């Protein structure tokens, strides 16, 4: 058994993990990031659009500041977020953007003078101020009052992650790539590190650390149609779930992005709509402004996705062999803009669809995109339930997104939370002595070894990994999608329970030697089905609509009964359902629940003392 | 009737004593908009669960899926089968260490490259949380990003004759990286500093200038211009250095 000791262990080398690692390393702690892929391939690099910070440098962002950003974030969350956290985030975001500039991110900058821009298909003019020349500029994104999205052409995540990874290399952060954490090591009170599997050799490696952080990104791959990378499968979440102690927050809050391309669900950035692209229906007519006169295409994602689905249900979808879709039109932005600021979009269209977006429409439909739910932490990023365990980024439910994340707020969250939680980890390290319990370390290792032997020998059964996985994905797709109903969710939970039983009897087709991809998939499968159940069961119990969670049978947002966060536990490994508990969405209320200004819906106010709805 | 595609795929699992390097044949019916990403996953899920390959973003932005496709390094995720003949041969990228089948270890190679090129901004300026960001001309920023677009897929390295001959050759990707810092006003390194890193056969003077690198780069980076630019710059620095001695 190979054992590696480090002060700080980070599961994940995306932006959140690496940003935190820099804090730990520069404070003098030995720091290792684990990653399934080389750090720079982490999904953070796929973010094209940009990241939000209330800098207020561009003329369309004039007057922007953390207060306005905070307000947008709380509204965007449909009041499901922790307002103290949203406040921390909004205040810190501008500083982090400047820090990134200092480290080398080539942000697009303010160019003084006149220029044109598009909104809702029409052209307007703007004049950038001379005195702001060369400061970080911004573009428009959905759900924001001001242009606030800082960007690097349309490779923001790529440029930022490369820069942050450079700083990691500079400060001696080690990245152990092709290494996947498969189990946490803990004694019920404190986390001691993880057992990981080498994706080069298949060996198990024990990592012992004083502080462990989960920064493993989203888990969109439990759905069949998603914009997420194939590694975003929640494998680290499943390890956390297995502790039985640490809860997941708001798992039912799943974001669908309006513009995944058909058929492969590759994302084309919200920057397309931010820069003036429009959505068209089968008659090639705009429709968003009829539902949302104010914001039209630039309402928040949950709202746009919903209206798109609604519009297709009304018969205005474009028929295709992959089902109905709508069109995204960016033709009017012109060749220079499309091949410059939207070059990735241009390449995705020409490379994967064989269409030219300068002259042709792009087929799009809403598709799974972001997991608001995840490892529940407090405002310091400390996970509930286990000392020495932290989480940040998309993997966490730190909870500044509530029930809907605004575009550009996630990438910004990764670095802001990474910085804050990184500093909290340093504080924790300085004030804590950790005694490692070698018996528990050995037992955990042995248990993982046993799990692998069982899968390889087929002792528990011979179900196919890939078939069970596909059935889990289909069940979620069918029952826990953009529109949800009691009936659909009950059926979904029911199906998933059957799938769970089968997941427990998986056996490999191959010998599982070396980096075996089949073994990697099998090791996380049962946990994934449990996560799927957390999504579906949480959604079934939440009898209201809030942000991305949309119950057709309970269309109102119900602040009287549901201004709460769901905490989902998997208390006993053999359980067939998660155990749900609830806590108030926020302790501090700067902005009381109100109207979001888009996506009009009924609200049952918290002052409303009448009996339960329906 | 759609085509039946024949795949010849390189197979070898170094950790399995029973495994010997060989080619395996798989047959798959072509469907609409089929890419190598979809095809390889189908083969793994339906025909041979042990097949190893790497995909991550499956959208041409992360660089995970470099492999040799009918003799040419490229990204498998954005390769459509309709652009290929009915017989498709897939090999792992050379130069990088083999993990198994089509999967190679690019991470270690690139990590070494960052350390060799010291791929970070060198500055004595200390970040001040309370100050405005330093201003930068937008055009400069865009020029830097142009070179920053590399996704480290390794295709250029695999296509490079020099890199195959000399293990220590840094490759176009590293030279491009130096070019990126050279034009960044925030990096305080001098041309002599860069010369220390690449003014030798491991660097710019080892390049034979045949430009296979630019031909295969899926991101269409201007590698040819970069190599020319650096060769001139480093040539001049070399002369200056000689005279100073
Ligand atoms: C296509 C796309 C475009 C997007 N565009 C934007 C945008 O423009 N603006 C915005 O704000 N947000 C955007 N987002 C969202 C945003 O990119 C992500 O939420 C964010 O990058 C997540 O960063 P992270 O650091 O939390 O995780 P990631 O960057 O996903 O990194 C996760 C890391 O964890 C590792 N890992 C996972 N599991 C394990 C394990 N078991 N063991 C070891 N390592 C593990 C992975 O290898 C990886 O290194 C986009 C998302 C997608 C899918
Ligand atoms: S031009 Fe130079 S770097 Fe490019 S392939 Fe040829 S030898 Fe290699
Ligand atoms: S320069 Fe081009 S070919 Fe080389 S690693 Fe970068 S993206 Fe790939
Ligand atoms: S899988 Fe990311 S580039 Fe091909």
Image (cartoon, rainbow, N blue to C red):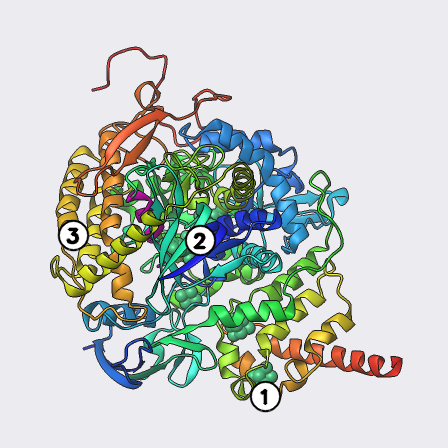
Residue A84 place in picture, x, y as percent: 50, 27
Near-viewer residue (B9 or A603)? B9
Q: Is residue A372 above or below residue B44?
A: above
- SS at circle 2: loop
Tag 2 residue: A12
User: Does residue A114 belong to the magenta stretch?
Assistant: no
- SS at circle 3: loop
Please indicate, yes or no, whether residue A249 appears anywhere in the rendered image. yes
Tell me where residue B174 sits by quadrant: bottom right
Q: Are the residues under marks 2 and 3 on the same chain?
A: yes
Q: Are the residues under marks 3 and 1 on the same chain?
A: no
Whole-Å distance between the Cαs marked 2 and 1? 39 Å
Residue B72 place in picture, x, y as percent: 43, 83
Tag 3 residue: A504
Tell me the chain of label 3. A
Mark positioned earlier in the residue sequence (2 or 3): 2
Q: Is residue B27 above or below residue A496?
A: below
Contact between marks 2 and 1 (CB within 8 A): the answer is: no
Badge 2 local density, few (<14 within 10 Å), some, or many (20+)? many
Please indicate, yes or no, whether residue A319 appears anywhere in the rendered image. no
Query: Which of labels 2 and 1 is toward the front?
Result: 2
Instruction: Tell me the magenta residue range.
Output: A230-242
> Does the closest atom of ligand 2 sit within 8 Å of the Cβ of label 1?
yes
> Does the closest atom of ligand 1 sit within 8 Å of the Cβ of label 3?
no
Whole-Å distance between the Cαs marked 3 and 1? 55 Å
Residue B152 place in picture, x, y as percent: 51, 69
Q: Are the residues under marks 2 and 1 on the same chain?
A: no
Q: Residue B210 has which mark?
A: 1
Whole-Å distance between the Cαs marked 2 and 3? 27 Å
């Amino acid at each position: 058994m190979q054992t590696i000791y480090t002060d700080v262990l980070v599961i994940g080398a995306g932006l959140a993990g690496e940003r935190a690692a820099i804090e730990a390393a520069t404070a003098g702690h030995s720091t290792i990031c684990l990653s399934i892929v080389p750090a720079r391939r982490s999904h953070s690099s796929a973010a094209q659009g940009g990241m939000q910070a209330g800098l207020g440098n561009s003329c369309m962002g004039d007057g922007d500041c953390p207060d306005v950003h905070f307000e947008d974030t709380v509204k965007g969350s449909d009041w499901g977020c922790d307002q103290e956290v949203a406040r921390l985030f909004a205040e810190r975001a501008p500083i982090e953007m400047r820090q990134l500039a200092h480290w080398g991110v080539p942000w697009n900058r303010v160019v003084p003078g006149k220029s044109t821009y598009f909104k809702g298909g029409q052209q307007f003019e703007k004049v950038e101020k001379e005195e702001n020349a060369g400061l970080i500029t911004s573009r428009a994104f959905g759900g924001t009052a001001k242009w606030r999205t800082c960007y690097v052409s349309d490779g923001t995540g790529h440029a930022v992650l490369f820069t942050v990874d450079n700083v990691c290399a500079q400060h001696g952060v080690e990245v152990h790539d092709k290494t996947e954490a498969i189990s946490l090591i803990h004694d019920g009170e404190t986390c001691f590190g993880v057992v990981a599997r080498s994706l080069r050799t298949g060996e198990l490696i024990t990592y012992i650390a004083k502080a462990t952080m989960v920064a493993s990104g989203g888990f969109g791959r439990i759905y069949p149609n998603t914009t997420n990378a194939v590694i975003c499968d929640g494998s680290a979440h499943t390890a956390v779930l297995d502790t039985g102690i640490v809860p997941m927050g708001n798992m039912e809050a799943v974001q669908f992005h309006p513009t995944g391309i058909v058929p492969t669900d590759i994302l084309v950035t919200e920057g397309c709509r931010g820069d003036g692209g429009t959505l068209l229906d089968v008659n090639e007519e705009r429709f968003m402004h009829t539902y949302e006169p104010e914001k039209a295409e630039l309402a928040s994602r949950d709202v746009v996705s919903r209206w798109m689905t609604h519009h297709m249900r009304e018969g205005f979808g474009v028929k295709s062999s992959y089902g109905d879709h709508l069109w995204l039109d960016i033709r009017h932005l012109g060749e220079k803009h499309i091949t410059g600021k939207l070059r990735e979009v241009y390449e995705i269209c020409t490379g994967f669809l064989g269409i030219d977006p300068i002259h042709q429409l792009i087929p799009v439909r809403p598709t799974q995109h972001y997991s608001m739910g995840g490892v529940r932490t407090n405002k310091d990023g400390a996970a509930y339930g286990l000392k020495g365990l932290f989480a940040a980024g998309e993997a966490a439910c730190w909870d500044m997104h509530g029930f809907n994340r605004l575009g550009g707020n996630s990438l910004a969250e990764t670095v802001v939370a990474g910085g804050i939680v990184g500093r909290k980890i340093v504080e924790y390290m300085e004030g804590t002595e950790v005694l490692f319990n070698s018996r528990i370390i050995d037992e955990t290792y042995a248990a993982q070894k046993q799990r692998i032997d069982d899968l390889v020998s087929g002792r528990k059964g011979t179900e196919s990994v890939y078939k069970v996985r596909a059935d889990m994905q289909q069940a979620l797709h069918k029952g826990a999608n953009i529109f949800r109903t009691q009936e659909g969710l009950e059926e979904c939970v029911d199906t998933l329970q059957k799938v769970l039983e089968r997941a427990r009897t998986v056996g490999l087709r191959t010998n599982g030697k070396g980096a075996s991809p089949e073994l990697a998939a099998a090791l996380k499968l049962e946990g994934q089905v449990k996560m799927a159940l957390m999504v579906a069961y949480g959604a079934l119990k939440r009898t209201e609509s809030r942000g991305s969670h949309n119950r057709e049978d309970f269309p109102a947002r119900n602040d009287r009964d549901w201004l709460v966060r769901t905490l989902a536990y998997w208390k006993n490994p053999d359980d067939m359902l998660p155990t749900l508990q609830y806590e108030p969405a926020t302790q501090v209320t700067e902005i009381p629940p109100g109207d979001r200004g888009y996506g009009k819906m009924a609200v049952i106010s918290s002052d409303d003392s009448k009996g339960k709805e329906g | 009737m759609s085509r039946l595609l024949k795949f010849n795929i390189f197979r070898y699992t170094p950790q399995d004593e029973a495994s010997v390097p060989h080619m395996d044949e798989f047959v798959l019916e072509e469907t609409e908009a089929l890419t190598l990403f979809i095809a390889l996953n189908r083969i793994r899920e339906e025909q041979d669960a042990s097949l190893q390959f790497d995909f991550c973003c499956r959208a041409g932005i992360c660089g995970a899926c470099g492999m040799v496709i009918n003799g040419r390094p490229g990204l498998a995720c954005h390769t459509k089968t309709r652009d290929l003949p009915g017989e498709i041969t897939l090999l792992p990228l050379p130069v990088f260490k083999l993990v198994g089948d089509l999967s190679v270890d690019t991470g270690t190679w690139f990590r070494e490259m960052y350390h060799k090129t010291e791929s970070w901004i060198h500055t004595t300026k200390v970040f001040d949380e309370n100050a405005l960001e330093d201003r930068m001309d937008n055009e400069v920023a865009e020029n830097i990003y142009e070179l920053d677009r590399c996704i480290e897929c390794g295709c250029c390295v695999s296509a490079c004759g020099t890199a195959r001959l000399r293990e220590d050759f840094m490759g176009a990707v590293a030279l491009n990286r130096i070019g990126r810092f050279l034009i960044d006003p925030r990096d305080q390194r001098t041309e002599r500093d860069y010369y220390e890193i690449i003014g030798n056969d491991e660097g710019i003077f080892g390049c034979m200038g045949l430009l296979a690198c630019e031909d295969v780069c899926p991101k269409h980076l201007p590698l040819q211009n970069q190599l020319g630019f650096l060769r001139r710059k480093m040539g001049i620095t070399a002369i200056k250095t000689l005279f100073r001695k």
